[in-house]
Image: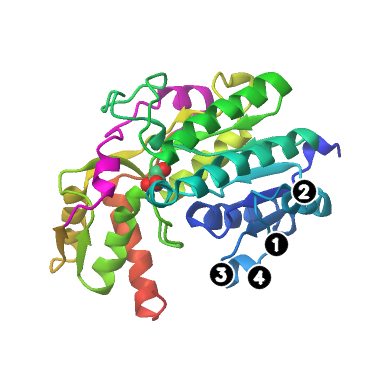
Amino acid sequence: MTKKDMKKILVTGAVGQIGSEITMELRKRYGNDNVLATGRKTKPRKTLRDSGPFEFIDITKKETVEKVIKEYDIDTIYNMAAILSAVGEERPIVCWNVNINGMYNILELAHEYEMTRVFVPSSIAAFGPETPRTNTPQETVLKPKTMYGVTKVAGELLGDYYFKRFGLDIRGVRYPGIVSSETLPGGGTTDYAVEIFYEAIKNKKYTCFVKKDTVLPMMYMPDCIKGTINLMEADISKLKHHCDFNMASMSFSAGELAAEIKKHIPEFKCIYKPDFRQAIADTWPQSIDDSAARKEWGWKPTYDLPSMTKDMLKKLGKRHKEGKL
Ligand code: SER
């Protein structure tokens, strides 16, 4: 078996919202011992810790990443460690440091150790108020107004640079807001679309931090995982883009989401108290044109708002009954 056929995967940010679920799926596909989960501070949940290797690293400290790359003979990286948009506005320097300097360390090490492949996520936050807000094109204005968005645009450019300059096989998508039932997101603008489900189950009411008519592109976690891994497994000769694929699934307003939940929990009440995150949401697109992803690597989402809502409420309802929510 050549090095290219092997898969020894490092997941950074593996305790986070997407990292925790993608690690479990990668372990299922490639074998538990072949997927190293890493985090910076937060303790991993039992399922993550018991199903395969886990190490603490800090991507802003290159030597901590290099150590595990050597120790585990890593050939593939999913760099899921990041500071999200809302926290990024509160702590812009930390956001730059993790999302850019941290990513730079990952790219340098991937180049140095001749990695087979690297995944680096971008986001709808790469767009800004000058971007067309509906059916946002693949190629368009990238002038974000948040530090998070700035790091995402720079990250896309940096990734494409490493591909062109050094031949590093690096891939990435612009994630919409991700709705999930396992790990809560940490400090993003789209977090309301996750919190609302937890609160609907636990308290039958939710105070939403964006206005009722705020529409953003969203995606359910199973589609996010499927899309991410499919892109990583795609034939490189078919890819014209690398680190900046638009990737869409569904778009809905906060009010439409609340109404969908109400179909299952009639007593549910949602009130709206916009905070600073409203201004961030107002600079992001409402819907995305992802035809490049569909054409180049066969992207196709499965879930829509009704099927996602049904599944979320089923999963969280079960955990609530077991006293685990
Ligand atoms: N979910 C992210 C955020 O809200 C967007 O990429 O910050």
Of mark 1 and mark 3, the one earlier in the sequence is 3
- Asked if the residue under mark 2 is in contact with the one under mark 3, i.e. CB atoms within 8 Å, the reply is no
Residue 282, by quadrant, is: top left
Q: CA distance from mark 1 to mark 3?
A: 13 Å
* Disc 1 packing (10 Å; few <14; some 14–19; many ≥20): some
Q: Nearer the viewer, mark 1 or mark 2?
A: 2
The three-letter code of the residue at mark 2 reads: Glu
Of mark 4 and mark 3, the one earlier in the sequence is 3
Of mark 2 and mark 4, the one earlier in the sequence is 4
Residue wearing tag 2: 66
Residue 290 within the magenta-colored segment of the rendering: yes
Query: In the image, 266: left or right of 305?
Result: left
Say what secondary structure mark 4 lies in. Answer: helix
**Quarter, ligand 1:** top left
Q: CA distance from mark 2 to mark 4?
A: 24 Å
Whether 277 is drawn above or below 318: the answer is above
Counting labels gives 4
Q: Which residues are magenta?
A: 273-299
The three-letter code of the residue at mark 4 reads: Asp
The three-letter code of the residue at mark 1 reads: Glu
Q: CA distance from mark 3 to mark 2?
A: 24 Å
* Disc 3 packing (10 Å; few <14; some 14–19; many ≥20): few
Figure quadrant of the C terminus: bottom left
Q: Is residue 29 visible?
A: no
- Asked if the residue under mark 1 is in contact with the one under mark 4, i.e. CB atoms within 8 Å, the reply is no
Q: Is mark 1 within 8 Å of ligand 1?
A: no
At a point 48% along the width and 30% down the height, the residue shown is 153
Query: In the image, 247: left or right of 129?
Result: right
Residue wearing tag 4: 50
Query: In the image, 122: left or right of 36?
Result: left
The residue nearer to you, when weighing 191 against 2, is: 191
